[in-house]
Amino acid sequence: MYKIKTLRALKLNLSAVTQLKPRITLVTPSFNQVQFIEQTIDSILSQNYQNLQYIVIDAGSTDGTITILKRYEKYFDQLIIESDNGSADAINKGLILADGEWFNWLNSDDLLLPNALDLLAEHARRWPLKTWISGCKVNIDEAGRMVGCQAPWREDINFWLLGEALFPQDATFIKTEFLRCNNIRLDSRLKNVYDTVLYLNLLVYSEPLLVSSVFSAMRWHSSQKTANSSQRSKETKAIITAQKQLPDQFKNTIARRLCRSRMHIMTIPFFAVLARCGLWPSRRQWDVDNFNVWNLTFECKKLKDFLTL
């Protein structure tokens, strides 16, 4: 009898913990990535996050991917195998089915790092009014070896001064209700830059919370869409169109052109000084939830606290 009561109490405690953590929906769009898909799935399931909705949408792979998906099907909330109009279309299908408070997708060649979802839940708990959260990622090669780390908000002037939408996709999570209330979806006509256009659409309504947590690993390999710069350049017009809807975009366009010209040695410091004085639009006042490695706690800062210019 004691063991039964203890087991019941344990189940109640686990249920309470689950309720405290926000529901997260992850979607994996899949097509012919048999060499990577199992690692992607394992990186999500091994999170052991108790309030996860995981949806996998495959476009009809012919390379053995579906065999692997069937093997893991019992661990998915939903597995859909049907033709689609590309990754953006598949992700939109997942968004329709999403019942989580937070939403993101993980491509079938990328990875979530250990405890990524628990870290997201902690940031969300500390900042309940934020509608999207963007962190950092590492880059890995085809064999899974780390080749670099990306935190654009800390290191890229194009991000904080020139208004570029440099948000690491697999490390950027969005409130599902925020997307639905503003009728925001991915543009399924785009094959490469739909995430960039999505973030520009989000910026019309609110700025994200920037966090120092490293959520994911993006795999770079020859058949990857992101690695194909020629294909991405064909969709540049969609980015320019989305940028036009943002406030101060005219000024940002001027700054981008001058800072990428031969005069950049002079113009970059010039615009940086104007931004520091509050005379030119920048993201210096955006909120950052930073992890302090010395006292092992999160601390609220502003982006300007991390900039050297």
Image (cartoon, rainbow, N blue to C red):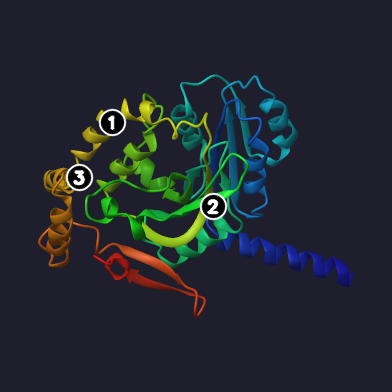
Query: Which of marks 3 and 2 precedes in the sequence?
Result: 2
Q: Secondary structure at mark 1?
A: helix
Question: Which residue is tagged 1?
Answer: 236
In the rendering, at what x and y percent does residue 282 appear? 20, 57
Crowding at dot 3, Cα within 10 Å, few <14 / some 14-19 / many 20+, comes out as few
Q: Secondary structure at mark 3?
A: loop
Classify residue 280 as left or right of residue 145: left
In the rendering, at what x and y percent does residue 3 appear? 87, 69
Res. 260 mark: 3
Q: Secondary structure at mark 2?
A: loop
Q: Nearer the viewer, mark 3 or mark 1?
A: 3
Between the C-alphas of marks 2 and 1, the distance is 35 Å
Q: Residue at x 32, y 68 (%)?
A: 306
Give the amino acid type for the residue marked by disc 2 in the picture. Answer: Arg
The answer to whether 287 is drawn above or below residue 56 in the figure is below
Classify residue 170 as left or right of residue 195: right
Q: Residue at x 12, y 67 (%)?
A: 277
Query: Which of marks 1 and 3 precedes in the sequence?
Result: 1
Give the amino acid type for the residue marked by disc 1 in the picture. Answer: Thr
> In which quadrant of the rendered view does residue 196 lie?
top left
Res. 23 mark: 2
Q: Nearer the viewer, residue 19 or 187?
A: 187
Between the C-alphas of marks 3 and 1, the distance is 17 Å
Q: Residue at x 31, y 25 (%)?
A: 234
